Image (cartoon, rainbow, N blue to C red):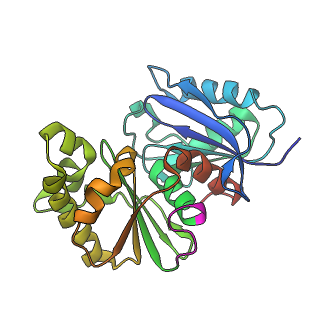
Amino acid sequence: MTEQPFGIDFGGTGIKGAPVDLDAGEFAGERVRIRTPEKSTPDNVRDVFVDLLAQFPDCKGAVGVTVPGVVRHGVVYSAANIDKSWVGTDADKLLTEATGREVHVVNDADAAGLAEVRYGAARGRSGLVIVTTLGTGIGSAMVHDGVLVPNSELGHLQVDGHDAESRAANSAREREGLSWEHWANRLTRYYRTLEMLFSPELFVVGGGVSKESEEFLPLLDLDTEIVPATLRNKAGVVGAALYASEGGG
């Protein structure tokens, strides 16, 4: 038996899970991926989690679960890309009772941010770090001296009269066929707004497009250092396990 925590990254299309070695910030076993049920209600997803954990009978540590939505004290308050019946659900209680394990639920971008600060691109950095994920929308995590400021939702800031992610997310670049230069101009406006509001020490950029960071990060005109994320698709699982191991929020 091992007391290593288990991380589950719950998204609109897939549910990924693995035990995590918190000393190394790496998976301690093979990651398993299960397709998210077409009707992703709390009861349906709960059953998937039970089956997933049963595949790791020797892992008995706390379980962390990411959710694509706002989470406060284990209760889900918004539901992006999952069934709307999650809203108002005490997910910590539901999943703890179903699995017989200590379960802590966290916003997906917040989990990724914690992982990047502890193990990734922001490791060893003090002050305020803002981690953003550029994908269908813009996810965000604010971590100050290693402490998470949860549910920042900075992708929904109003920039030039628009919801920021509607113009600066990677989906906007793809939808509108923007050149890297044109998209970089929009990103510069977005990150300058974050600079003005928060004066961070560092920006970390995640999401699938971060693999192509050399195409657009050098084009940004900012005062703040900005770097690509390093954990990429591991960040959610690792961050969830880390969050759970520290007792959640």
Left or right: residue 143 versus residue 219 is right
Report the front residue among 217 and 40: 217
- Which residues are the magenta region? 118-125
Q: Residue at x 19, y 45 (%)?
A: 173
Residue 175 position by quadrant: top left
Q: Which quadrant of the structure image shows residue 187?
A: bottom left
- Taking the magenta stretch, the answer to whether it contains residue 85 is no
Question: What is the residue that sits farthest to the right in this orientation?
Answer: 1
Q: Which corner quadrant holds the C terminus?
A: bottom right
Q: 24 or 81, which is in the foreground?
A: 24
Quarter in which the N terminus is drawn: top right
Residue 159's place in the image compared with 176, above or below, is below
- Residue at the extreme left: 161
**Residue 77 placed where, x, y %?**
43, 47
Q: Position of residue 10 (x, y in %)?
A: 52, 37
State the residue at coordinates (22%, 70%).
193
Q: How many marks?
A: 0
Point 18% across, 66% down: residue: 189
- Image coords of residue 28 (percent x, y): 74, 44
Tell me the chief SS of the magenta region: loop
The image quadrant that residue 131 belongs to is: bottom left
Q: Where 35 falls versus 248 (above or below)?
A: above
Farthest top residue in view: 38
What x and y, as percent, mark residue 34?
A: 57, 25
